[in-house]
Image: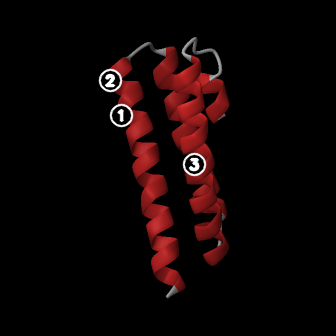
Amino acid sequence: FHELLYKHLENKMLIQIIKMVRQNSLRIRNFAERQSAFTKEIASSDTDEHLEIVRAIKSRDSERTGGAVYVHIMNSKRRIIQALENKN
């Protein structure tokens, strides 16, 4: 899903930066998720967030799209922090 959002960019440097950030965030997320149960609720929530991002992009509403991406990132951050805190 994530690659579909940026693979058609013409700015190759931006693509490389996005890929680097994505790789590092996946490492953190994978570590955190090994510390807790990745539930159907989390998968469903992720899917709903992705669908909202797609709907926002299709509507060509940049504020809605930015808001949907922000919500997705903040929810991911919250889940990672919760998983890491529950480890201790």
Which residue is outermost to the left? 63
Separation of residues labelled 2 and 1 (CA atoms): 6 Å
* Quadrant in the rendering for residue 85: bottom left
Nearer to the camera, 30 or 14? 14
Name the residue rendered at 44%, 68% in the picture.
81
Query: Quick check: can you spot residue 51?
Result: no
Q: Which residue is mark 3?
A: 46
Q: Which mark is residue 63?
A: 2
Circle 3 packing at 10 Å, graded few (<14), some (14-19), many (20+), is: some
* Quadrant in the rendering for residue 33: bottom right
Residue 21, relative to residue 77: is it above or below?
Answer: above
- Cβ–Cβ under 8 Å for marks 3 and 2: no
Separation of residues labelled 1 and 3 (CA atoms): 15 Å
Nearer to the camera, 30 or 63? 30
Give the residue type that dot 1 points to: Gly
x and y, in percent, of residue 50 in the image:
56, 37
Q: Which mark is residue 67?
A: 1
Question: Which is nearer the N-term, disc 1 or disc 3?
Answer: 3
Nearer to the camera, 58 or 77? 77
- Cβ–Cβ under 8 Å for marks 2 and 1: yes
Question: Which is nearer the N-term, disc 3 or disc 2?
Answer: 3
Give the residue type that dot 3 points to: Asp
Name the residue rendered at 32%, 23% in the picture.
63
